[in-house]
Image (cartoon, rainbow, N blue to C red):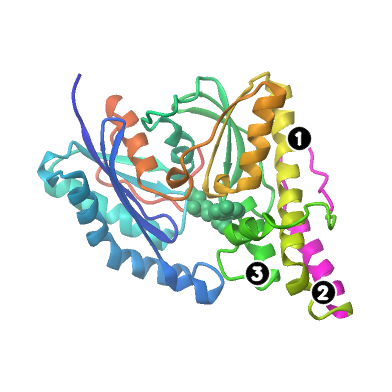
Amino acid sequence: NETNYILAIESSCDDTSAAVLRNNNVLSNVVASQKIHEEYGGVVPELASRAHQQNIVPVINQALAKANIDKKQLSAIAFTRGPGLMGSLLVGTSFAKSMALGLNIPLIEVNHMQAHILAHFIQDKDMAPPKFPFLALTISGGHTQILKVSDYFEMQVLGQTLDDAVGEAFDKSAKILGLPYPGGPLVDTYAKDGNPLAFEFPIPKVNDLNFSFSGLKTSILYFVQRKTKENPNFIAENLADICAAIQHTIVTIIMRKLKKSVKLTGIKTVAIGGGVSANSGIRKAILDAETNLGWKVHIPKFEYCTDNAAMIGIVGYLKFKKRLFAEQDVTAKARYTF
Ligand code: KG4
Ligand code: ZN
């Protein structure tokens, strides 16, 4: 049994992250979040690339130091090839290529969305990984998909969003309410004190296992505009209830599609991943399904839900074992489906 040390680099959006893994064990996982985007109400790609450029060396050095590993001990370097913002991906990709070249060790390219799913295979003393085949729900600021996962690298998309991602639905709703970016976690926080049935928003009718969230955003906008005309303090006076109702609607949409997927495939093992799986409403609904519907559910640790390099590292480790290495001329891919 060989011991491998993998350095993983994630720079697909607005978090610069580096992790060191010893086989499937995370020794360090450093994340530098970029505050700069808050004042713009969303990620500004040009600013994100510049911040990655500034962060990448200190973040990698911290990850190596925390793991107590010298770079000469590394077996391979894994990096996020895509999907994501091109300028952001280029920083991590170029850095990983240069470092692997300098150290003369293999380079491993990783699909970010696959990493959100395979994060479940990071060794954890409290949790066993999901058993194949399982259903994966990936919900983030950029993606919303339900997949059938038959093996580590055998995944089939069963359904996905036709427009906005779930995270966008949260963030755009929050923006309408005047909350700062990213508003998803704030909606979650305010929702805790609200009545989910205080207001009702329409559930979109979408075929098959696909999703649509752009209509929800529009109906929230019109609702808020109408109510604010009647009472200029409407948002401030009802923030908790509005957030609870929005969250309830989103959770309902997701759970209906998940239940449909379980019915269609007969697979009752469900693993969630992506930044929005940090949402307490979704966590609760999925745990309820475990209790009431006999599902086996897998929810990653909080730090492995939002963007992080540890999840890139576990894919790196799984690929390393199969000797699935990338060539030195590998390029970043803003749109990277699998
Ligand atoms: O996976 P992630 O960190 O980055 C992407 O790959 O997009 O996901 C970020 C998204 C953002 O839209 C953020 O608002 C949302 O996840 N998010 C949440 C919560 N925590 C993060 N949305 C709702 N409730 C939360 N607790
Ligand atoms: Zn992500």
Specify whether 10 is left or right of 200: left
Front-most of 253 and 107? 253
Range shown magenta: 202-229
Q: State the residue lying farthest toward the right.
A: 230
Task: Name the N-terminal-most of marks 2 and 3.
Answer: 3
Name the mark on residue 208: 1
Spatial separation of the CA atoms under disc 3 and disc 1: 30 Å
Where residue 71 sits in the image (x, y, percent)?
14, 46
Residue ID at (34%, 64%): 52
- At x 81%, y 81%, the residue is 232
Q: Was residue 314 drawn as part of the magenta stretch in this picture?
A: no
Note whether ligand 1 is within 8 Å of mark 3. Answer: no
Mark 3 vs mark 1: give the one in front: 3
Q: Name the residue type under label 2.
A: Gln
Q: Which of labels 2 and 1 is toward the front?
A: 2
Q: Is residue 226 above or below residue 270?
A: below
Q: Nearer the viewer, residue 283 or 207?
A: 283
Q: Which residue is mark 2?
A: 225
Q: Secondary structure at mark 3?
A: helix
Percent across and percent down for residue 269 are 59, 23
Q: Which residue is mark 3?
A: 175
